[in-house]
Amino acid sequence: MRPEILFPFYADTESLTGVGGRIAALLEKLVGRKVGDLFWHLPVDMIDRRSNPALDDIDYDQIATLEVTVGKHDAPPQKSRRPYRVFCHDDSGEIQLIFFHARGDYLRRQLPEGQKRLISGKVEMSGSHLQMSHPDYMLPLDKRDEIPAVEPVYPLTAGISGKVMAKIIRHALERLVDLPEWQDMSVMAREGWPSWKEAVLKLHNPEKPEDLDMKCPARMRLAYDEFLANQLALVIMRQQARKKKGRILKSKGPLKAQVLANLPYELTMAQKESLTEIEEDLSAPYAMMRLLQGDVGSGKTVVALLAMLVAVENGAQAAMIAPTEILARQHFDSLQDMIKGTGLRLAVLTGRDKGKSREAILASLSTGEIDILVGTHALFQKDVMYHDLAMAVIDEQHRFGVEQRLALAAKGNADYTMDILAMTATPIPRTLTLTAYGDMDGSRLWEKPPGRKPVDTRTIPLNRLDEVVRGLRRALEGGARVYWICPLVEESEALDFAAAEERHRTLQKIFGNRVGLVHGKMKAREKDAVMADFSAGKIDILVATTVIEVGVNVPEATVMVIEHAERFGLSQLHQLRGRVGRGADKSICLLLYGALQSEASKARLKIMRETEDGFVIAEEDLKLRGAGELLGTRQSGLPSFKVASLEDHGALIAMARDDAKLILQKDPDLSSERGKALRILLYLFDRDEGVRYLASG
């Protein structure tokens, strides 16, 4: 299947001159095992050795290549810590070459007294004299060609030096070949982009600092190539999914009418629109793959329930999967309230359910006595057999990978592909939605349900902690309930937990047994018990690490205190703030900050004060932190990009998306000349699943 023209790029890096098994293993960790992987390992800096000044023209630190005459060697006494010095000069002045832990015999061979030599490295001023420590090059005059005028600086790994890396990549670039052009020539002309091969060579051979810029034409060209490969693969996968036979599920209405009558409010415009889109998908002859994005408290659960009712009204079952046990049980409780009087049979299944109770649930599920099953990923396990599962809702989609999504789809009726509705309360910027969820249709809940009051957000320095505690006393006397979130400590769960325990002890001394504690090290049952006490008003202050971030619902809680708020990302602060402001009373969020060392942390707190719009916050968070950190790349199923950066090149994604759609409308199986070139592009960026889908379709 792989195009023959790409065979040299797929060769093992061990086939390169100077790369043995040890180096190949180190390269594999850094970039990959194929020669082609090295094309994307781009320089991050450059060393310009083109400056050849006379010694008296140097008056500041600079990289220079100098022609000097070697003078006296000044070797330190044995066991002395003094460096080895070599004095050199030209007609205009003197320079000292400095060597630590030097071998004198080697240096005398390299720098014989009285001989002329070329030396290249960083010249520094030490007091009033010039010096160069450990020159990068020391060569006779006739070997001037061995000193590169400009040297690319590559990211390294332990065991591979800069010179070795540059040499390996030079050998890899010898295998570059011209590939057929897959980009539209009018776009190339408009953007001023070079050809693919020219772009790769240009980026590896920078001549000026601008050549390293993320927005230089060569980098933009390759970033666009990569986004186009990504978008083509996603559009192909989506088109193929549309060809898979789905079950036609039409909304019949009586159950929906009963649930709507149970709600204490009217659906928002956004909820109605999203529901219409979902019902249209369900009634189509292909399987639904839809992502429902809604800010904290925008009413996703209601929409999800109304969607699941369509499956139940058609005699089938639905499942709802949440990332944690707390959240699964909470969904179960809120769904129970909504379905009163409908006769629907609802059950919950998590890892906690064992023995007889689990067996009873599984038996009812397989005979069809359960209409909707709520749970954690325990719902994927082999022994969980459904009578007729037609639809699944996945909550907090970014915590579930594509593999889990496919494992779930396989649980459905063998004759049909299952309908899937993914939901997230983590607003995802548009660029990320297109790259990570481009195979799904999207709906957005942009409004908050009626009656939600804005949360008053304030920033307070940590040294005013005593005032905050006095304010809490007043709030508690007025019947408030309080979340107190402890800081993230160097990404260490053990230290997070220690900080939370310490704060819990301090607050207990002041407020007694009205203070509870939850953290990630507790067993699920213990966590649930504390949360239940908080919900029921048995405790008034809940000290927590970020385990309460997603989905916890206590409408009576009106105060959120976040300690060391500057250590949290924007989206996380927004999620935490979303725990309050859920009831009729006015809520407040206090962001306590320590030292605001970076501009980014100042900007985050400012944005939190200015807006509660999760989508605005997500876009800002992407700018401040980058994509991987935003969703936690390891767990998010985000595609990893080799050349493109969502932060720097995000504007190209929509353009690539439109281009991909247009290409496949005109040439659905990529059989034209440009189509064949685009197949090569898909392989080049490891998006060959797109080609495989085309072949199987």
Image (spheres, grey):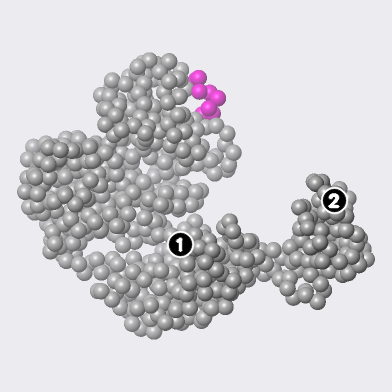
Please count the marks in the image.
Answer: 2
* Residue at figure coordinates x 21%, y 50% from the top left: 381
Q: Is residue 444 visible?
A: no
**Lateral position of residue 675 relative to residue 166, left or right:** left
Q: What x and y, as percent, mark residue 32? A: 48, 65
* Residue at figure coordinates x 12%, y 64% from the top left: 415
Name the amino acid type tagged 2. Answer: Pro
* Residue at figure coordinates x 49%, y 56% from the top left: 647
Magenta highlight range: 457-467
Name the amino acid type tagged 1. Answer: Phe
User: The N terminus lies in which quarter of the figure?
Assistant: bottom left
Between the C-alphas of marks 1 and 2, the distance is 51 Å
Q: What x and y, as percent, mark residue 563? A: 47, 30
Q: Which residue is mark 1?
A: 641
Q: What x and y, as percent, mark residue 275? A: 21, 51
Task: Tell whether label 2 touches label 1 (CB within 8 Å).
Answer: no
Say which of 398 and 481 sits in front: 398
Q: Earlier in the sequence, mark 1 or mark 2?
A: 2
Q: Quadrant of residue 281?
A: bottom left
**Lateral position of residue 597 relative to residue 95, left or right:** left
Q: What x and y, as percent, mark residue 91? A: 93, 66
Q: Which residue is mark 2?
A: 76
Magenta run includes residue 157? no
